[in-house]
Every structure is written in C-alpha cells, then in structure tokens.
C-alpha cells in the first residue's frame, strides 16, 4: 500500500485505500502510518466525506459537562464556582462558556473586596495554625538535651557564628556575636557546660546609633542576668539615611558580643572539636586545619 515518498501521483488509488481503511474503523493517525501520507492536507482530502469511526469521537460525558457548565454560566455562576461544582479544570470551563456574556456582579466592588479580604484572612489564619503546629511538633521532638548533644551543638554554633583564627590573621580568641536571643541563650548554656565562669565574660552591645541604645542595653543585660553597668562600652554603628534598613523599630536591639577572657586554650579546644565533627562525616579530610 505504500507509495513513493513525497509523491501522490496515484491520488485516486490512495483515496480508494484510505476510504477502505476508514470504513474498517481506522483513525487518521492509523491511516497516515499505514499509507505513509504525512501531508495533513492531502490526508484530509483522502478521507473527505467519510465520517470518523465512533471510537475516535469525544466521550459523551464531557459533552454533558459542557452543557451543564453553560447552564450554570447563564445563571450567573463564576468560573471558580462552576469548576468546584463540576469538578473539572478552570481552563475547560473557560473554553466551554467563553462565548457567553459575563454575568453581572451580584455585589458591589467594596463588598467583593471585603469578601476577598475575609477569605485571605481565613487562609492566612489556617496557614499560621499549620505553621505553628509544625514548629511545635518539631520542638517537642527534640526533648531534653544530653551534655554531649549540647556540646556538639555549641561547637557547631560557635564555628558558624564565632570569631575564628586564620593563617593570615592569628587570633585565638573566643568571641561570639549574635542578634537572636535564643542563640545567645544556647551559647551561654554551652559555656556553662564547659565550666567557663561568668566573670570571664566580657559582654557589650553592638547597635546602630539611631536606635534606642538604653533600651537595648537593658534588654541584653536582663537576658544574660547581669547589671546594665556590667556591660562593656556599647559599639555604635553610624546610621546611613540613604540605606533602606529593615532592622528598625521597637523590636530592634542590635547584637550582643560575648568575649571569653583568656580564651586561647578554649579556642583551641573548640577548633579541635570542630575538626572531630568534620572528620566524623569526612574521614581523612584535613583541608580545614589552620
């Protein structure tokens, strides 16, 4: 049944074959493959006048959905309402009813905005509940920390946030700076585990000069359990009015710097412990030794 590629000289012969196949229940795709006719226009001409087989027609169920969608649209239903009612895609609804006029709104623009805002508020409340439930479950899963677990956490925390010795800048000092009160509390608990006395700690606030410095000093002093007067001199950062800062307002309290006096030996222990953690996951890796 094949013909010379790209040539349709025996059109009538091809048509006779195509019609015979069509009447046997072949689809256009099957006829195309059978006769090797890849020109869409010629393929359509070959079967012109021959109805497609029943099995290639759209399912009747979709026709019924289309008619129902049109009825609902005429009643003033929105795309979203029709989609929910019929359980079909919004794109299908649009295709089925796009020739129908848009129904008149049943409420004023103000009422529509109020409904939208109320819906968004309900959605955000649900999302907040789910978010808080996830956080609470994760917090409860931690349970009580053993001394060893706290030790590992503290070493990793310091190595992420603390001052580190470098080959080009030797400074075996223990200094930790952070703005998060929870992080500071964990660091202090870790120092206590390592039996670092509080009188070895030098604490000072680091903050923009435009902030409420007195309030920030009181906040950090209360958090770590010392008198405000026991804090070191606050380090002020000049305020640049051209820079758009988000850390402003009453909740902005700057950072707290905690330095351990005579901390060279402690620093070496921290660094060595960190090497141990890295070595536990990457045995033989000496690339981070300083």
Image (spheres, rainbow, N blue to C red):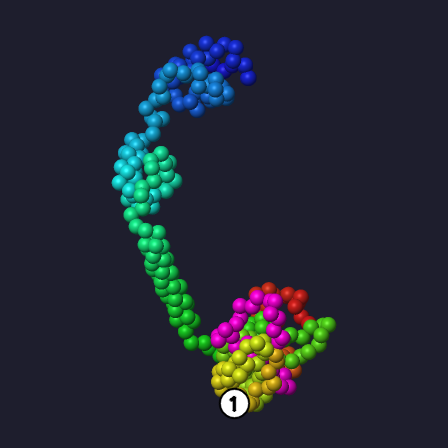
* Percent position of residue 136, x then y: 39, 69
Q: Quadrant of the C terminus?
A: bottom right
Q: Dot 1, crowdedness within 10 Å: few (<14), some or many (≥20)?
A: few
Q: Give the residue at x 29% y 43%.
A: 77
Confirm whether the magenta stretch covers residue 253. Answer: yes
Query: In this rendering, would 149 be left or right of 78?
Result: right
Name the outermost residue toward the right. Answer: 168
Confirm whether the magenta stretch covers residue 225. Answer: no
Q: Give the residue at x 47% y 14%.
A: 1
Q: Image quadrant of residue 120?
A: bottom left
* Percent position of residue 10, x then y: 50, 9
Query: In this rendering, would 240 be left or right of 180?
Result: right
* Percent position of residue 185, x then y: 50, 79
* Percent position of residue 12, x then y: 46, 9
- Near-viewer residue (132 or 90): 90
Q: Is residue 287 above or below residue 18?
A: below
- The secondary structure type at the circle numbered 1 is loop
- Magenta residues: mostly which secondary structure? loop
Q: Image quadrant of residue 207?
A: bottom right
Q: Is residue 110 above or below residue 26?
A: below
Chain part drawn in magenta: 237-263
The answer, for residue 3, to whether it is visible in the render is yes
Q: Is residue 56 above or below residue 223?
A: above
Total marks placed = 1
Q: Give the residue at x 48% y 17%.
A: 42
Q: Give the residue at x 52% y 72%.
A: 248
Q: Which residue is mark 1?
A: 227
């Amino acid at each position: 049944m094949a013909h010379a590629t790209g040539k349709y000289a025996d059109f009538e012969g091809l048509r006779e074959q195509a019609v015979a196949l069509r009447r046997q229940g072949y689809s256009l795709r099957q006829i195309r493959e059978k006769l090797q006719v890849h020109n869409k226009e010629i393929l359509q001409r070959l079967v012109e006048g021959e109805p497609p087989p029943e099995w290639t027609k759209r399912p009747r169920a979709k026709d019924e959905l289309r008619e129902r969608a049109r009825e609902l649209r005429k009643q003033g239903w929105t795309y979203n309402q029709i989609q929910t009612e019929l359980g079909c895609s919004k794109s299908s609804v649009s295709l089925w009813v796009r020739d129908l006029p848009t129904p008149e709104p049943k409420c004023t623009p103000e009422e529509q905005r109020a409904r939208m805002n109320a819906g968004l508020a309900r959605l955000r409340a649900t999302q907040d509940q789910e978010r808080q439930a996830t956080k609470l479950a994760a917090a409860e899963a931690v349970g009580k920390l053993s001394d060893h677990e706290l030790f590992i956490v503290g070493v990793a925390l310091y190595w992420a946030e603390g001052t580190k010795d470098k080959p080009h800048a030797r400074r075996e000092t223990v200094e930790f700076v952070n703005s998060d009160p929870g992080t500071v509390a964990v660091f202090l608990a870790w120092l206590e585990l390592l039996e670092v006395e509080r009188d070895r700690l030098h604490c000072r606030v680091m903050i923009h000069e435009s902030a409420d410095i007195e309030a920030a000093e009181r906040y950090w002093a209360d958090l770590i359990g010392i008198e405000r007067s026991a804090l070191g001199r606050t380090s002020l950062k000049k305020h640049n009015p051209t820079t758009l800062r988000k850390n402003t307002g009453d909740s902005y309290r700057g950072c707290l710097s905690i330095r351990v006096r005579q901390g060279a030996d402690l620093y070496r222990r921290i660094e060595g412990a960190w090497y141990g953690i890295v070595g536990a996951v990457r045995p033989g890796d000496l690339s981070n030794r300083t």
